[in-house]
Image (tube, grey):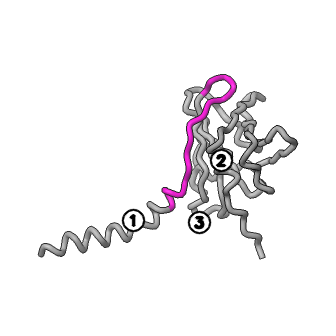
């Protein structure tokens, strides 16, 4: 009888471990834009099989009242001529059968982040907001190194 709780606990851990490992793979930072608004930046592999696989970059406003434009791409530049345009995948924020997109969050496909940016140059993100405004967010060294270190997407065969 003493082994039963141990066995049940071990089975529960083995069942939950894959999901916990995927959650641990995500990287998250808190940043500020040019106006001092706070943002959460998250980099992760798309876990939902209902959507195409690949790495995603999600920006979520931590300051109330900010609305992002869910139709426009995210622009990334490195100040040395490097520029990337990441497709908006905000529709992945809700179930495939619909639902309202969160006003303050947007998600982007990182497949176009090739070649990977240098880990030595700061990166600037230009996030389109509702009403033709843009939030400018400069990444620090740890965020820039995380983008540089991403594995290259697997080419479809």
Picture residue at 76% right of the left edge, 49% below the top:
118
Task: Give the alpha-carbon distance from disc 3 to disc 1, as whole Å.
Answer: 18 Å
Tell me if residue 28 is in the magenta stretch: yes
Residue beneath disc 2: 107
Sequence order check, earlier mark of 3 and 2: 3
Q: Residue furthest front?
A: 120
* Residue 93 x/y as whole percent: 59, 49
Task: Give the alpha-carbon distance from disc 3 to disc 2, as whole Å.
Answer: 16 Å
Q: Which residues are magenta?
A: 22-37
Q: For this rendering, which residue is in front, 121 or 1?
A: 121
Picture residue at 70% right of the left edge, 35% below the top:
138
Res 59 seen here: yes
Task: Give the alpha-carbon distance from disc 1 to disc 2, as whole Å.
Answer: 26 Å
Give the number of the mark in front: 1 or 2: 1
Residue beneath disc 3: 49
Q: Is 7 left, or right, of 142 in this rendering?
A: left
């Amino acid at each position: 009888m003493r082994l039963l709780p141990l066995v049940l606990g071990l089975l529960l851990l083995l069942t939950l471990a894959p999901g916990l490992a995927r959650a641990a793979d995500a990287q998250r930072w808190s940043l500020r834009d040019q106006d001092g608004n706070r943002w959460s930046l998250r980099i992760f592999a798309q876990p939902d099989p209902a959507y195409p696989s690949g790495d995603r970059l999600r920006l979520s406003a931590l300051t109330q009242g900010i609305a992002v434009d869910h139709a426009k791409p995210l622009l990334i530049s490195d100040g040395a001529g490097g520029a990337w345009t990441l497709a908006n995948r905000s529709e992945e924020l809700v179930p495939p059968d619909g639902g309202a997109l969160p006003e303050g969050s947007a998600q982007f496909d990182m497949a176009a982040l090739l070649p990977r940016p240098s880990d030595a140059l700061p990166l600037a993100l230009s996030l389109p907001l509702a009403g033709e405004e843009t939030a400018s967010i400069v990444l620090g060294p740890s965020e820039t190194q995380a983008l540089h270190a991403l594995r290259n997407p697997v080419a479809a065969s």
